[in-house]
Every structure is written in structure tokens, then in C-alpha cells.
Amino acid sequence: MSWWLLLVLAALTYASRAAGLALLPAPPTRLERLLARIPAPLFAGFVALSLVSPDRSVASVPVLGATAGALCVVPTRSFPIVLVGGMAGYAIASALT
Amino acid sequence: MLKKLPVKAVRWAERDIVLAAFSTGLAIAVYGVVFGVVAGPGWGSWRAILASALIYSGSAQFAAAQLLAQGGGAGAVISAAAILNARNVVLGAVLRSRVRDGPVRRAGVAFLMDDESFGLAMASARSAVKVVLGAGAIFFVAWVGGTAIGAFAGSGSVVFADAATAMFPVLFVGLAAISVEDRAGLVRTVAAGTGTLGLVYAFPAVRDFVPVAAAVAVSLLGGRR
């Protein structure tokens, strides 16, 4: 990793973050409505992303257990409870494997 | 189970945001240690730490470390980083709709906007800027500090890596649960999750952009509000 490559990667990453947040004007109402729909599907996508590795291997059983445990308590919509559900799922799956 | 979900978006209280920020920060620190162990020997300890401080993007840094270790050139590393970072443009645009501050402040906030701080900002009842700055600062310190530990202490310092891996889906399950605003949103969320699962398996080369593409697609196709 040369210094210039490190600086290019830093500039590229920052530019991608600033492009949407700092450079764009406030979105019009219709676009704002569309943008408001994106977070929940996006978070669901991030869940899926964290369950499959770049080499196509599926996450370990305890990680799957943690995800299942969190999903079980989704109706509470409380992060502490989702966290406890995830930890419980992780512990149970670890004990079983 | 999903039918029981209340059909109204909720916002987390400050207590929940702080808990989520610190528990996620612990997981990020563990990942930072792993990065330090992976990159430290080849890049040099201080360069790995500076990379974490200046680039501050786990996916781009891990990709760079992997490509360089395999003999990849600068062009491949820059191309990979560009693809991985493309989703930040969409995240920034979504967050922009909740930020009324001026461009200079937004430019400062942008440095600390990653997947996790974005998620907490969207979930919080507080100012999105304050959440990105507060949670982002925790994540930044965790990432850079973890890298330093990994770079200097070596592979013996990698513990609880699997438990840290489990933290990310748990966090995003929680964030998705509170962000669903109605039954149509619930359908979109489930569709995006299952669709992403299949697509990242089928197209691993562009996996980091799939969640954004799937979320935008289902949001465009979704019903009226």
C-alpha cells in the first residue's frame, strides 16, 4: 500500500459520502417520499449481506442463530430486546454446535 | 410473527441509540483488530493505522488488503473501492432528506457516515446530524483503536471475532424492524432481504452494492403512501 494509493482511497471514500449528503440540494417532496421508503429494505439487505461471505459461504451457525433470535423478537421493536434475542440465539446455537 | 408487527414507523429513544452505538462499537473494534492483523505485516503497522484513520471504510480497506496481497495493482484496488463506495452516494442522499444544516456542516458529517451511523441516525428521534457525529465518533475510535491493537499485538489479539460478526445482522434486524412504516413497507423489506440474499450469493463480485440496488428497486416498485 503506497502512500499515494492510500490517499486516493481516502479521497474516493470521502467523496462518495459527501456527494449525496453535502453536495446534493434538499430533495423535492416526491423524491423525499421515495427516499423515506429506502431505509427498512436497505437494512434488511444489510442483514442478508452479513449472512453470506464474499466466497459464497454462509455465516456460521451461531451467527445464524443470533439473527434468528433477533428476528424472533422483532415485534417488540426495541433494540435492547432485539440485542438480548440475538445474544440468546447466539448462545443457544453455540451450545448446540 | 410478521403480521403482529405494528404498522407504524417508530423512533428509538436516546437510551436505545447509545446502547446500540456502544455495542456496535465493540463489534467494530473487533473487526478493526482483524484488519490490523491482516494489513499490519504487509503495510507496516503505522500505515495500517493511518489507513483506518484516513479511509475509514472497512469494506474498502479489507478489499485493498486482499487485492494487494494477491498481487493486484493500484487500478484494481481503486476500481474495487469505487464499486464498494458507490452505495455511500445513496445513503448520503437518503440521510440528506433528514438534514437541514448547511453544506459545510454536512461536509464534516459526511466523513463519519458509514452504514451503522447512517442506520442509527435514521432510527433516532434525535437530530440525524448529532447521531452521526456521536455514534460515528464512537465507531471511528473503535475502528482505528482496534486496528492499532491488531497491528501491534498480532494474531493473538483476535478474539470474539465470530461474536462480533453476529452483532451486525442483529443491529440491522433491529433497525429494519423499527423503520417499517406500514404493511406495504413490510413487504418491501422482506422482499429486499430475501432478494439480496439470493443476489449476493449469485453475484458475489458486486455484493456490496446489492443491498442498495435492491432497496431502491423495491422502493420504486412499492405502492403509494
Image (cartoon, coloured by chain):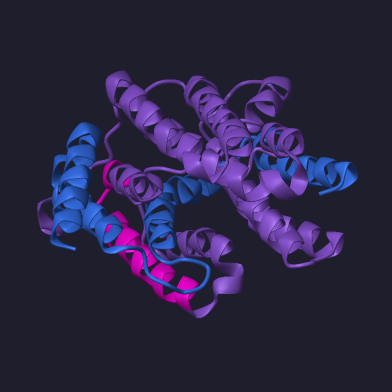
> Is B171 rendered above or below residue B184?
above
Give B153 or B29, whichever is nearer the viewer. Answer: B153
Residue depicted at 81% across the width and 43% down the height? A6
**Magenta-drawn stretch contains B166:** no
Q: Is residue A32 left or right of residue B148?
A: left
Could one spot residue B124 in this view of the protein?
no
Magenta residues: mostly which secondary structure?
Answer: helix
B164 vs B107: above or below: below
Q: Position of residue B71 (x, y in %)?
A: 79, 67
- Return the residue found at the far bottom: B202
Q: Camera-side residue: A43 or B106?
A: A43
Residue B36 pos. (x, y %)? 61, 41
Q: Left of B148 or right of it: where is A39?
A: left
Q: Colour of chain A?
A: blue
Residue B2 placement (x, y as % from top left): 15, 57
In the image, B13 versus B27, the foreground residue is B27
Residue B51 falls in image quadrant: top right
Tell whether B98 sits left or right of B4: right
Decide if residue A78 is on the left or right side of residue B93.
left
Which segment did they paint magenta? Answer: B177-201
Q: Colour of chain B?
A: purple
**Image position of A55 with respect to B8: above or below:** below
Q: How many marks?
A: 0
Q: Quadrant of the C terminus of chain A?
A: bottom left
- Outermost residue toward the right in this view: A4
Decide if residue A4 is in sight here. Answer: yes
At a point 40% along the width and 28% down the height, the residue shown is: B21
